[in-house]
Amino acid sequence: MFDPAQAPLGVFDSGVGGLTVLAALKRQLPQEDFIYFGDTARVPYGRKPLEMVRDFALEISQELISRGVKGIVVACNTASAASLPELADKLPVPVWGVVEPGVEVALRMPGQGRIGVLGTEGTLKARAYESHLEAAGREVWSKACPLFVPIVEEGISDSQIARLVAEHYLSERPELQTVILGCTHYPALKGMLQELLGPKVQLVDSAEATAAVVAADLKNLGLVSNEPKTAASIHHLVSGDVTSYLHTAKILGGPLGSVERIYLGQAGRQRDTVSG
């Protein structure tokens, strides 16, 4: 008899940034199998119309459901901001985004000072973080940081270039109590950002916050895998070039597992499959 708890958990992002969320999920849920979708053919989402991103999120989610996932983690701030909670209403499995968990952690931080949000243009345009924080009575300062993603993907997070760009983005910041890293790439810049912001500013990593929420919810829903495994499996679906994905993913510590190129909406999807 089929046990839904033993089904894999689906995770998707516009590219490789969601691998930081996948890594956090693996730490919280080491016995789970995962299917990760990186929509590298259509990256970046940050500057695309929110309606288009919403359509992408639904298309990818339907593909993951066709592969038998028991839940879906939208490991992309722009897609989370654009498509939730509407996406969750349309799907037959639990759905989690990365926005609300980050907001909840920020609101639990001691003090009532101003909260900063660093993110992509699309995430900030949707005002997902701002609306939640303002509804809780908090003052918010937000800043789009479009160059952070290519800096991380080029592997120059610790460079002087990265520091100069970060100093530029933060130059007009007001006094801040907490800063939410509102993009899955940004944890790679955490050390430098903390240094620039100062030790009194608390940084919130939405990847860790999301993983904790997903783990707790799966337990409450009775969907945590308890099947003994020597190693959980991870299967990566990539809409763009596999070689490029493997190269960029290594910068973020992945991928481990098999990688398959997929052509959404077309027949003959299983191509370019490799193991990592």
Image (spheres, grey):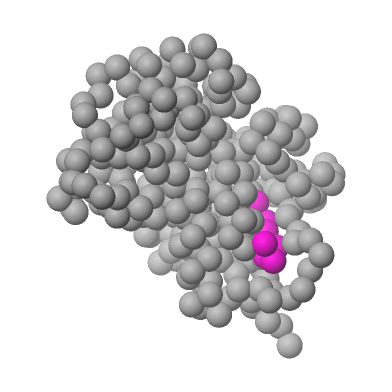
User: In the image, residue 230 lies at what x, y percent?
Assistant: 81, 65
Q: Residue at x 67, y 56 (%)?
A: 35
Tell me, yes or no, if residue 246 can be seen here. yes
* Count of picture labels: 0
103, above or below 52, in the image: below
- Relative placement, left or right, of 123 versus 254 is left
Residue farthest to the bottom? 1
Q: Residue at x 52, y 57 (%)?
A: 211
Q: Residue at x 47, y 25 (%)?
A: 192
Residue farthest to the left? 137
| Quadrant in which the C terminus appears | top right
- Relative placement, left or right, of 186 versus 153 is left
34, above or below 165, in the image: below
Q: Quadrant of residue 31?
A: bottom right
User: In the image, residue 120 lies at what x, y percent?
Assistant: 41, 32
107, above or below 226, in the image: above
| Quadrant in which the N terminus appears | bottom right
Residue 35 is one of the magenta-drawn residues: yes
Q: Nearer the viewer, residue 239 or 177?
A: 177
Query: What residue range appears in magenta?
Result: 30-36
Q: Quadrant of residue 254?
A: top right
- Relative placement, left or right, of 77 versus 200 is right
User: In the image, residue 116 lies at what x, y percent?
Assistant: 29, 36
Q: Nearer the viewer, residue 228 or 1?
A: 228
Tell me, yes or no, if residue 79 can be seen here. no
- Relative placement, left or right, of 98 versus 158 is left
Q: Nearer the viewer, residue 23 or 244?
A: 23
Q: Residue at x 41, y 20 (%)?
A: 166
Residue 40 is one of the magenta-drawn residues: no
